């Protein structure tokens, strides 16, 4: 069934720009625009027999709001609505796959380059060089949304005992988002 789904999905691939990665030659990145997504995400194992649609695809398509930090043709970074700390950001590929190992190598390379760039912006904006990069692959590993994504969680000298409480309100997210976007613009300018 998986091969049959893959064949169907590949008919919908669209060609996009040709980014380069340090360890790869110029490559074509492919992505699938998927518009049907589920509203509620439950902790359950991904099944190849069901069409996969995620909350993140809906967010990527602009169907639900998010505090967007950085966007390329192939990735989107946005603030987590339930942050573990100030500046907690998610970086997701626009190609919807459940697990990191399912990404084509060129898409994985592009995702990691974007992840590094966003991490640099967070370091500059949040004033800390300490952060975790987290990937939960599969339900047993703690993955809840079955669309591959990395968390960048800044860490601070003083332990944040609130564990993110109050950091997910829209006003705080807007303020933090603006700080990170300014830092990224500064990094890109020079």
Image: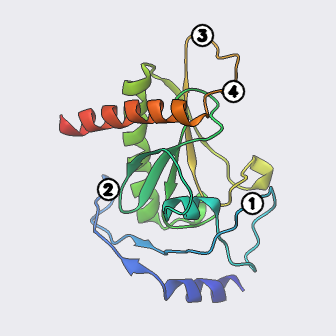
Q: Secondary structure at mark 1?
A: loop
Give how far across and how far down residue 60 sits, in percent.
50, 61
Q: Residue furthest left?
A: 190
Asked whether disc 4 touches disc 2, contact meaning CB atoms under 8 Å apart, the reply is: no
Give the spatial CA distance, label 4 vs label 2.
38 Å
Q: Earlier in the sequence, mark 4 or mark 2?
A: 2
Q: Disc 2 on helix, strand or loop? A: loop
Ranked by sequence position, the earlier of labels 4 and 1 is: 1
Residue 119 falls left or right of residue 7: left
Q: Where, by quadrant of the figure, is residue 45 drawn?
A: bottom right
Q: Judge depth for marks 1 and 2 and give the one in front.
A: 1
Residue at figure coordinates x 29%, y 62% from the top left? 19
Residues 64 and 147: in front is 64
x, y (%) of residue 34? 55, 75
In whole angstroms, how far apart are the C-alphas of marks 1 and 2? 36 Å
The numbered dot on residue 40 is: 1
Q: In terms of depth relative to the viewer, which is nearer, 70 or 45?
A: 70
In the image, taking residue 148 as reference, residue 91 lies left or right, namely: left
Question: Is mark 1 in CB contact (under 8 Å) with mark 2?
Answer: no
Circle 4 is placed at which residue position?
A: 165
Vertically, is 170 above or below 146? above
Which element is circle 3 on?
A: loop
Q: CA distance from mark 3 to mark 2?
A: 37 Å
Res. 157 image quadrant: top right
Disc ID at residue 158 = 3
Among numbered discs 4 and 3, the one appearing first in the sequence: 3
Q: Residue at x 49, y 75 (%)?
A: 32
Is 120 rendered above or below residue 64?
A: above
Q: Which residue lies under the disc numbered 2?
A: 21
Callout 1: few (<14), some (14-19), or many (20+) C-alpha neighbours within 10 Å? few
Tag 4, which secondary structure? loop
């Amino acid at each position: 069934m998986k091969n049959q789904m893959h064949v169907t999905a590949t008919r919908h691939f669209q060609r996009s720009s040709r980014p380069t990665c340090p360890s790869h030659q110029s490559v074509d990145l492919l992505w699938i625009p998927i518009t049907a997504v589920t509203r509620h995400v439950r902790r359950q194992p991904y099944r190849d027999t069901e069409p996969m649609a995620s909350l993140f695809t809906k967010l990527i398509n602009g169907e639900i709001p998010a505090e967007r930090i950085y966007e390329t043709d192939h990735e989107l970074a946005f603030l987590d609505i339930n942050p573990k700390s100030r500046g907690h950001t998610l970086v997701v590929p626009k190609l919807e796959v459940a697990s990191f190992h399912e990404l084509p190598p060129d898409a994985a390379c592009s995702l990691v380059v974007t992840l590094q760039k966003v991490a640099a912006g967070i370091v500059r904006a949040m004033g800390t060089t300490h952060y975790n990069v987290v990937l939960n692959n599969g339900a047993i590993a703690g993955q809840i949304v079955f669309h591959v994504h990395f968390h960048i969680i800044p860490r601070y000298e003083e332990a944040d005992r609130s564990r993110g409480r109050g950091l997910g309100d829209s006003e705080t997210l807007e303020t933090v988002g603006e700080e990170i976007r300014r830092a990224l613009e500064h990094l890109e300018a020079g």
